[in-house]
Image: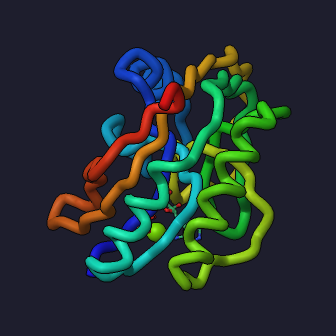
Amino acid sequence: MKRLFFALWPSDETRKQLNSFNQSIAQNGLRKLKADNLHITLLFLGNTCAITEILLRKKADSIRVQPFVLTLDQLEFWRKAKVLCLTTAQYDPQLGLLVDALNQLAEQCAMHIEERAYKPHITLARKAQKLIDIKVLPIQWQADSFCLIESCSTAEGVHYQVLQSWSFAG
Ligand code: ATP
Ligand code: MG
């Protein structure tokens, strides 16, 4: 079994911007994500067998959405999860279409998916205690593709492996 999820994966440039913002914040006990791990989850699949993975990949080939830009412009503290996240006030309908399509695809593969409303976010840091009062200079994330990612746990913490990427252009 592999622990899988669909995600938006940042370009090197966007990753740098996200990481430099992350490095500019500080709070006692804060555990920041490694730059390499920054991402936006589209749909978490969890433990997935090889046959289902093949089916998911095949079905994902037929997803069609237009490229879009995400403007990450607000920092949020999620009390229950104790995380600091970068989020967006408003997002392009294409992102909603993409997430809907992925949910349908998972349903067709008989996967059990949680029903919480989707909220795009980048987790920047864990073990947060409160919000940090800092001005966020909006970061523009040009989304041109989505990816299937394997979450691998290692002695040095979780590592994300991009298994496949689908371009929006088709
Ligand atoms: P770790 O769990 O080892 O601390 P992690 O949370 O970064 O690290 P995963 O648990 O594999 O790694 O999660 C991968 C991605 O999927 C993360 O963005 C995480 O927030 C998201 N995720 C994990 N579990 C769920 C879930 N039950 N529902 C929605 N998203 C989830
Ligand atoms: Mg987790």
Of residues 91 and 165, the one nearer the viewer is 165
Q: Residue furthest right?
A: 90
Q: Is residue 114 left or right of residue 48?
A: right
Q: How is the image coloured?
A: rainbow
**What residue is rendered at 54% in x and 52% in y?**
41
Q: Residue furthest left?
A: 155
The quarter of the picture where residue 101 lies is bottom right
Q: Residue at x 51, y 25 (%)?
A: 169
Residue at x 45% of width, y 32% of height: 167
Percent of width and height locating residue 12: 35, 21
Q: Is residue 29 visible?
A: no
Residue 7 appears anywhere in the view: yes
- Residue 43 coordinates in the image, percent (x, y): 57, 61
In which image quadrant can residue 40 be found?
A: top right
Q: Is residue 27 left or right of residue 118?
A: left
Q: x and y percent of residue 58 in the render?
A: 39, 60
- Residue 75 versus residue 129: which sits nearer the camera? 75
Vertical order, 92 against 29 (above or below): above
In the image, residue 168 sits, relative to residue 34, either above or below, namely above
Q: Residue at x 42, y 40 (%)?
A: 166
**Quadrant occupied by the N terminus:** bottom left
Count numbered badges in the picture: 0
Is 43 situated above or below 124?
A: below
The residue nearer to you, when weighing 45 against 35, is 45
